[in-house]
Image: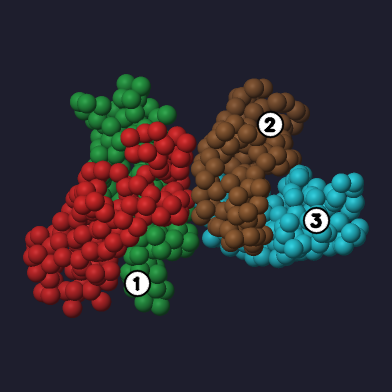
Chain colours: A brown, B cyan, C green, D red
Amino acid sequence: MGKTYDQINIGDMAFMEKTVGESDVYLFAGITGDFNPAHINHEATKDTKFGGRIAHGILSAGFVSAVLGMQLPGPGTIYLSQQLVFKGPVKIGDTIKAVAEVVEKLEKGRIRLKTTCFNQDGMQVLDGEALVIAPRA
Amino acid sequence: MGKTYDQINIGDMAFMEKTVGESDVYLFAGITGDFNPAHINHEATKDTKFGGRIAHGILSAGFVSAVLGMQLPGPGTIYLSQQLVFKGPVKIGDTIKAVAEVVEKLEKGRIRLKTTCFNQDGMQVLDGEALVIAPRA
Amino acid sequence: MGKTYDQINIGDMAFMEKTVGESDVYLFAGITGDFNPAHINHEATKDTKFGGRIAHGILSAGFVSAVLGMQLPGPGTIYLSQQLVFKGPVKIGDTIKAVAEVVEKLEKGRIRLKTTCFNQDGMQVLDGEALVIAPRA
Amino acid sequence: MGKTYDQINIGDMAFMEKTVGESDVYLFAGITGDFNPAHINHEATKDTKFGGRIAHGILSAGFVSAVLGMQLPGPGTIYLSQQLVFKGPVKIGDTIKAVAEVVEKLEKGRIRLKTTCFNQDGMQVLDGEALVIAPRA
């Protein structure tokens, strides 16, 4: 089980890192049906400012969700809401660090976390925040 | 290419539907590393109120993203932000309808859409809204 | 980073659990090319004593490897050898618990672990042991 | 069906070869949950002696299993045990040859095989042996 409300403190952080592979983008496209050429067409994207295909923005949100569901608070968490602000592209081959940081403890067991993703150059690609209910003791 | 700002009107709608397979949930877990037992452990979940494994909430957001990126506005869209409110569980085998509806046209080519998901019983599982820039002519 | 030699004690245990989905078996078949009918042919297996398709034995070894590489000792581990004894079938839908337990601390940073897998009925499906070098401090 | 005990002779060999793709490693990580940075984080591994991500050792065992289950003895084989000694890294892009060679015929239909994997430079990456029961006539 994950951490309970009482075990969580403001400022607590957790993260995960993964290099985004072509297979991640292709499987995500296959699961969702989002075949936007930005994600799966090299010829259509090679001469854009990004120089090729980019990952779906929601893929980074998936990494955020993994941090919340696996670590902070962890298994047993109830996911209430998630705000996502897409700040920059994730290119195939980028290594993304998804970070969750507790910013507020609210009534009824609710926890507010700042949720961000950065690439290997320290550029922020995702901003936002999550509201969850921590697991019960 | 998708629809331009001028081609889009308030009230325009688009949707997609998919039955969520076990493979969707398992691939999503595999891409993100979210092995929360809620998603991949039948024994740990069969006696919960949901009666088994449920999909990752962000998977439904992926369907929303597919509607935006493929249909409304469609290819060429710049995804600025997404608010997600998780209203109910998506069980393996549920058929999810993801809907996007234009609710506001803003300056600088920006479009605001209401984004929702419903299951086969008409129960809302996701609420929220997206802000995008429509493709240029 | 994972646990160092000094942080590991005889009797330490770690585990993971996952319900083996059809997609796990099919992807494993697709990665390895092991299209043995036992794994991917329902018609050829439905009347056998297992009553259908079973997972590749090595898939359970993958769960063992995940416990070693993610938890005990964890990232930084050097995997020297693995003995596997296949004790029983893993059917699609079974929930497998992979367990690693430290049984000996050897010279040169090496750790010996008993590695076992059980199904949801407590039946042992895999036995064996692993030899690893724990991460350096 | 595969070869029966009587059709198998000491010295019989079979093999398969596959170039290990990033997708193989990523799917294997996704099936097992083994997100050890050694396998899925380019930034964390690019300056190691391996110069990047390496495949899970058990993936090579999967190739061995495919040779046993598909060719020698082939479908109908009962896999009793497998010893694995990890001799060197498999990098993404390496082409692995998995070889099984019959070394002993035992009582009760059992066959012992030497099981090895080599990369494209002839470097041995896996050693070990398997014990199987050949299919019945």
Which element carries disc 3, helix, strand or loop? loop
Note whether C44 is above or below D112 in the view shown. below
Q: Is A62 on the left or on the right of D7, as rendered? A: right
**Picture coordinates of residue A99, whole percent (x, y):** 61, 33
Q: Is C120 on the left or on the right of A115, as rendered? A: left
According to the image, label 1 marks what residue?
C37
- Label 3–label 2 contact, CB within 8 A: no
Identify the residue at horizontal 35%, vertical 57% (top origin). Answer: D19
Q: Residues within 10 Å of mark 2 (few under 14, many from 20)?
A: many
Task: Please state which amino acid type lies under the numbered disc 3.
Answer: Arg
**Picture coordinates of residue B3, whole percent (x, y):** 81, 62
Identify the residue at horizontal 24%, vertical 69% (top origin). Answer: D71
Asked if marks 3 and 2 fall on the same chain, the answer is no
Judging from the image, mark 3 belongs to the subunit labelled B
Q: Is residue D112 visible?
A: yes
**Picture coordinates of residue B116, whole percent (x, y):** 78, 55
Label disc, if present, on residue A113 of the rendered structure: 2
Q: Is D106 on the left or on the right of C11, as rendered? A: left
Note whether D20 is above or below A124 in the view shown. below
Which element carries disc 1, helix, strand or loop? helix
Identify the residue at horizontal 75%, vertical 54% (top origin). Answer: B77
Q: Residues within 10 Å of mark 3 (few under 14, many from 20)?
A: few
Q: Quadrant of the N terminus of chain A?
A: top right
According to the image, label 3 marks what residue?
B136
Q: CA distance from mark 1 to mark 3?
A: 53 Å
Identify the residue at horizontal 33%, vertical 65% (top origin). Answer: C34
Task: Please state which amino acid type lies under the numbered disc 2.
Answer: Leu
Which element carries disc 2, helix, strand or loop? strand
Task: Please state which amino acid type lies under the numbered disc 1.
Answer: Pro
For marks 1 and 3, give the one nearer the viewer: 3
